[in-house]
Image: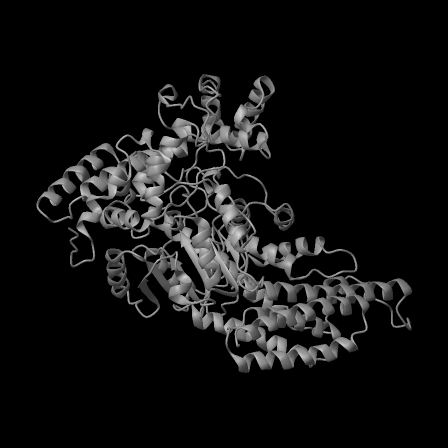
Amino acid sequence: MTTSSADGRVGNRIENYNGFWKEDLGREDEGATEKRLDSYTEVVNGYYDGATQLYEYGWAQSFHFSRFYKGEAFHASLARHEHYLAAQMGLRPGMRVLDVGCGVGGPAREIAQFSDATIVGLNNNDFQINRARKYTARVGLEKQVTFVKGDFMKLVEQFGENSFDAVYAIEATCHAPSWEGVYGEIFKILKPGGVFGVYEWCMTDEWDPSNPEHKRLAHELELGNGIPEMRPLRLARQALKTVGFTVEHEEDLATRPDPIPWYYPLEGDISKAQTFWDYFTVWRMSWSGKLVTHNATRVLEWFGLLPKGTHSVGESLKIAGDALVKGGQTKVPGTLLPDDLRSNLTEFERRSQGSIRGDAKKYALERASDFIAQFGLPPEFIGVHEAENKFREQIYNWFKNTVGQGNPSDIAWNPVATTIIPYAHAESSSSPANSTRPTVVSPVQYAALHPAAPISTPLPPVTSPHLKLTITKSTIRDAFLRNTEASTLANMIQTLAISDPSPTPLTAVLEALFEALSTETKSGHFNDNREAMAYLRRYYEASTYFTTSVVHAGVSGPLAGPRAIQMQVRKFSTWVPNATTKQDRQLPVLSSASASSSMSDEMQRIASDRQRRKDHIQWANIHAAALELGMLGMGHAGDADNSGYAYAMGRAFSEMVARDAVWESDEVEWVAGICVLRAVIRTAMRGDRRQRDEYDELLRTYEKRWREIKDEARQSFVTEVLLAAKEDLARLDETLR
């Protein structure tokens, strides 16, 4: 008999949960898997009826993993994980966003506060929906964040096509019976140009279902996480493409060389806790913490304070925790015996504590190269793309994770050649207006703090105690050109900013960015918005690592980066026809007897003026990219509300620049204006006919100016931008039909 409680839980559903798996997971067969897939609703609801309160007690209201930095609080890491996804998707005020598989609403509330977007949380579990609504009302977000019951395999039936500006899923669609089914539904409910961001649970493509150890590990993950079937990453990639998405990037975040592994809270080693409060989180996964939880759930269930079956689900959670740690730790191939490396651990640790940045990593990579030279690559790496680099990186991670764990001889090493990492993400990066069809967005790394939203949790400090290099503007420029990783770039920028006593130290950084962007410009050509977007996005990502020691114009921490961009954009948005440049000031002073400048001086003046015009257009491209990335939230330094109002202020400034430039007399202003206008159109609110008609009229005015442009290169450039802007405007038309 089915019994339902007042809170929405179904008693026998929890009791029946473990029955979907065989008692001996090593004997699982296709029949059992098919049964779970056919009954996925019962499987998932039975799991979450029993596991939700245990999740909230032992983890948080955000049911997902994240990467960690040294000294970073557990809850700050979870929030950063959510912020980055929202920023990369370009979520902003006025957008309607669906959270697929929202849990108790932790990510939805965080992302709503961060982006000021309107979030609809979808869940098929009554118990979780009730708790999500209660928590949301408690923080006063019930008008901005709402929750509905529904099946993510029937989204079109519930919402209709073209219903959302964006959709995201955080470790939720792994519960679906098929990825093609849930991704296909998401694709249909997105508006044209919409964006889908996903953190997906996958086995790596090296996972071999014919290997008994691999197979058992997958079933342990399924049982302990309410997942009908664990599947490899390649199937997620294939499913996304099959239903029509454009996958722009994908990455397994578990392979990042982080100093703190993503699974560390599950290890139960309180010595690894990063902050005081994290001791309690980690302790709950220790043997004593598990013992307390084990006995407490048994007693509470016996007294009727927890539904029957909760204790059994809790035991499944312990199996999952152990499996996740095992999966995360078996990244180095078993063919490499620990004895081959233990003798080098002492030297690696000594170098890691030295003053030369990167010396320890260099040492570890050299030892990996020695192994390859002597024994060749392990069999499982044969035929893998960039196999040697991946193998060396895994050796480095082994060194790093082993040092500090105590006696190296006590380190467990799986003799089976496995590369199972069950925490993989299908990813990409795109702006909602970048394509006429939805794109898949999941972050490459953590970064891109949205400037038009408050930060509800502190971001981790990024320190570089061993960095002794002299950082100059040229160093930063070269780092941009080399596509330096965001956290490293942030360290360099912070070093430069701290050494600069001026109130606007990031100005030099943006000058370096501008120089790098100009370096890539082909002679006689203009960079389009894509190049500016790439450079600015990298700067944006780096700024999220800024500590409060970085202060620009009264704004500190991550928001200092956008603040610097806002100031530079305003500074260079006005064209000064006869401005005296530094180069002009260096020209020789002619005597009063001279009737005119020499030929060489005149040529130098012409070249200088041409370069100034080119720079003005370049800054217009940066302006446009900043607007599309949401960096122009032009509030005041002390504003408590740095959300929708600030974003609207920044966008209004861009509209003003685009409207005014077309009426100026110099053609360079027309070129700059059309660049900004295109970004204004791309970030326009859908469904506003008055606004759409205004942009159409403005485009026609620019088209008239295009005929008056005398410089052939500028006219060719404006031709491309005009055509692209008309296409973007046509997409606005589609939303009005």
Residue 251 x/y as whole percent: 51, 44
When the figure is inspected, residue 294 is found, relative to residue 453, above or below; the finding is above
**Residue at point 24%, 62% (across, down):** 134
Give the image location of residue 89, x and y in percent: 49, 58
Residue 319, how many percent across, how many down? Answer: 29, 35
The answer to whether residue 531 of the structure is visible from this angle is yes
Q: Which of 432 and 406 lies nearest the eye of the viewer? A: 432
- In the visual, does 585 lie left or right of 684? right
**Residue at the location (16% across, 42% down)?**
297
Number of marks in picture: 0
Q: Is residue 689 left or right of residue 592?
A: left
Which quadrant of the view contains residue 112?
Answer: bottom left
Which residue is depicted at the point 53% across and 44% down? 488
Q: Residue 495: x and y, percent?
A: 53, 47
Camera-nearest residue between 532 and 97: 97
Furthest residue toward front: 31
Q: Is residue 548 visible?
A: no
Q: Is residue 553 above or below residue 25?
A: below
Tell me how the rendering is colored: one colour
Query: To which quarter of the image does residue 321 belong?
Result: top left
Is 602 situated left or right of 83 in this image?
right
Relative to residue 289, is residue 643 drawn left or right?
right
Camera-side residue of 384 and 234? 234
